[in-house]
Structure formats: structure tokens, C-alpha cells
Image (cartoon, helix red, strand yellow):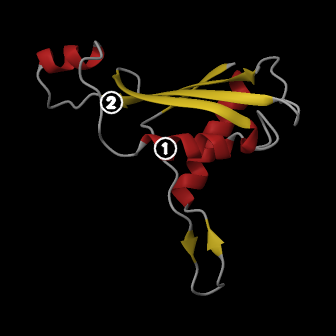
């Protein structure tokens, strides 16, 4: 199954520690982004059923970054053609982590079921995440 999360890609932020309650918590921007990922998955799921706990899964992500407006027309064309790729934050592993955590309980029981994963960062006209989730057969 495929789904698209609109907006500039974001990564999983480090957990924070509250001095008052002495507990850890997920920062609001990360929690909000995970909610957007879950919503996009739910809207695009169609007839997709959650993978049973005895199945393996694979997740493939294409993170599309906005092309800087200050770039020349030539450089923008090169970016669209894939000749220039983003090396900016967030790191690919943090993007992968936020997606895997957001899909816990929706696409699979737990992200430990995901045994094959990949991410590519590209420039695109429509920034966001194109996510593919499927069963992985050994």
C-alpha cells in the first residue's frame, strides 16, 4: 500500500525530560507529525488490513524536499532530474523512525516486524513523504 504525507519532511526528535514531573515525553512537533502520518495512512489504506503479528513487513520512503527558491532555473531543473539530492536535515534515519513509530498498531502490531526498510531523499515540486508498506515474504 502507498500513501503520501504532505509537507516538508520531519524527523523524530529526541525525547525530552520534564523537571517538574520527572517523566520523559515526545516533543509536540514530533507528536503532531506522527498524527499527520497516521491520518494519511488511514485515509489511503483502502482495503489494507493490519499485518498479523507473525508476518514480516517492509517500509520504503521517498522524502521529497522543497527546492530552494533562491536557486537558478538550471539548478532547479537538475534537482528535479535527480542530479542534485538534498543533504540537509533531517537525517534519513530520523525520518524512518518517525514513520515506523507512527504506523505502530495501524500497519503492523509493532515496528519490530519491519525487517526490510529504505529511504531516499530527493527534491520535488510537492514536498512530503511517499510511503510504501507491504508484507515481506522470506
- Coordinates of residue 10 in the picture (x, y in percent): 46, 44
Tell which residue pokes out farthest to the front in this image.
138
Q: What residue is pinned by disc 1?
A: 93
Q: In the drawing, does residue 33 fall left or right of residue 136?
A: left
The label number, if any, that marks residue 36 in the structure image: none
- Residue highlighted by disc 2: 66
Label 2, residues with CA under 10 Å away: few <14, some 14-19, many ≥20: some
Which residue occupies 52% across, 55% down?
Answer: 29
Dividing the image into 4 quarters, which one contains the C terminus?
A: top right
Quadrant of the frame with the N terminus: top right
Upstream in sequence: badge 1 or badge 2: 2
Image height of 98 relative to 127, above or below: below
Where residue 6 appears, x then y in whole percent?
50, 30
The residue lying toward the viewer, choosing from 88 and 3, is 88
The Cα–Cα distance between marks 1 and 2, rounded to whole angstroms, is 19 Å
State the residue in front, 3 or 39: 3
Q: Is residue 77 above or below residue 31?
A: above
Q: Residue at x 29, y 38 (%)?
A: 87
What residue lies at 68% left-to-right and 38% top-to-bottom? 38
- Farthest-out residue, bottom: 20
Residue 3: x and y in percent read 62, 23
Amino acid at each position: 500500500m502507498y500513501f503520501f504525507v504532505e509537507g516538508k519532511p520531519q524527523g523524530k526528535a529526541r525525547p525530552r525530560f520534564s523537571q517538574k514531573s520527572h517523566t520523559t515525553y515526545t516533543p509536540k512537533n514530533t507528536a503532531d507529525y506522527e498524527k499527520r502520518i497516521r491520518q494519511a495512512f488511514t485515509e489511503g489504506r483502502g482495503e489494507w488490513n493490519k499485518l498479523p503479528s507473525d508476518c514480516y513487513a517492509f517500509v520504503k520512503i521517498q522524502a521529497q524536499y522543497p527546492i530552494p527558491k533562491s536557486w537558478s532555473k538550471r539548478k532547479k531543473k537538475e534537482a528535479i532530474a535527480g542530479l542534485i539530492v538534498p543533504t540537509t536535515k533531517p537525517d534519513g534515519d530520523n525520518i524512518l523512525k518517525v514513520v515506523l513509530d507512527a504506523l505502530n498498531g495501524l500497519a503492523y502490531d509493532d515496528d519490530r516486524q519491519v525487517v526490510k526498510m529504505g529511504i531516499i531523499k530527493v527534491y520535488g515540486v510537492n514536498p512530503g513523504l511517499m510511503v510504501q508498506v507491504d508484507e515481506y515474504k522470506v
